[in-house]
Amino acid sequence: MKIIAILIISLAALNPFQKSMAQNDKQSPAVLNHIAVYVTDLKVATDFYESVFSLPQIPEPFHDGKHTWFSLGNAGQLHLIQGAKTTELHDKNEHLCFSVASVDAFVNKLKAKNIKFEDWPGKEGAITLRVDGVKQVYFKDTDGHWLEVNDAK
């Protein structure tokens, strides 16, 4: 009985210590690892992302001809995955966004590649100027996924 009482008193005495330790043990926030985009034609999609965004390919572990991985620098990776059956209609609110040094220079690249772009409201060939001064354009990849390009720092 004495042992049980000592054990209960010891556990009660340690309780504040455990709570203070738990408060100091904050979890680090999660970081983005990768974004996966499901595509109908891997070669076409790979060529598109490589040529439009100048993304460097990185090794992918599967070696099955159904994956292309790109580095996004500190932001993580972009994984293209072969297998989508059809091109679907995607909502513009669901998009990937890339930042560039100059939207104007990027727009010239899109024009040279005959890639149609628009501003947020949907005016073709227009550039949105946000209230914070950031320029942005929207366009679709080869599978109809919406992409934004802006000059946010």
Image (cartoon, rainbow, N blue to C red):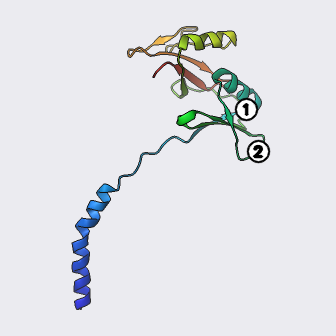
Q: Quadrant of residue 43?
A: top right
Residue 39 occupies quadrant: top right
Number of callouts in the render? 2
Does 33 sit above or below residue 8? above
Q: Which residue is mark 2?
A: 63
Q: Earlier in the sequence, mark 2 or mark 1?
A: 1
Per the image, label 2 sits on a secondary structure element best described as loop
> Whole-Å distance between the Cαs marked 2 and 1?
18 Å
> Residue 17, how many percent across, how many down?
25, 66
Residue name at image x 73 percent, y 32 percent: 40
Comparing labels 2 and 1, the label whose residue is closer to the camera: 2
Label pair 2/1, CB-CB below 8 angstroms: no
Residue drawn at x 53%, y 29% is 94
Q: Residue at x 66, y 14 (%)?
A: 115
Q: Return the x and y of residue 28 as percentages of the image width and height.
A: 41, 48
Foreground pick, 54 / 133: 54
Report the residue that reaches farthest toward the bottom.
Answer: 1
Tell me: 91 left or right of 81: left
To which residue does mark 1 refer? 40
Q: Quadrant of the N terminus?
A: bottom left
Q: Position of residue 60 (x, y in %)?
A: 70, 43
User: What amino acid type should be assigned to the residue bearing mark 2?
Assistant: His
Query: From what the image shows, is residue 17 above or below residue 143?
Result: below
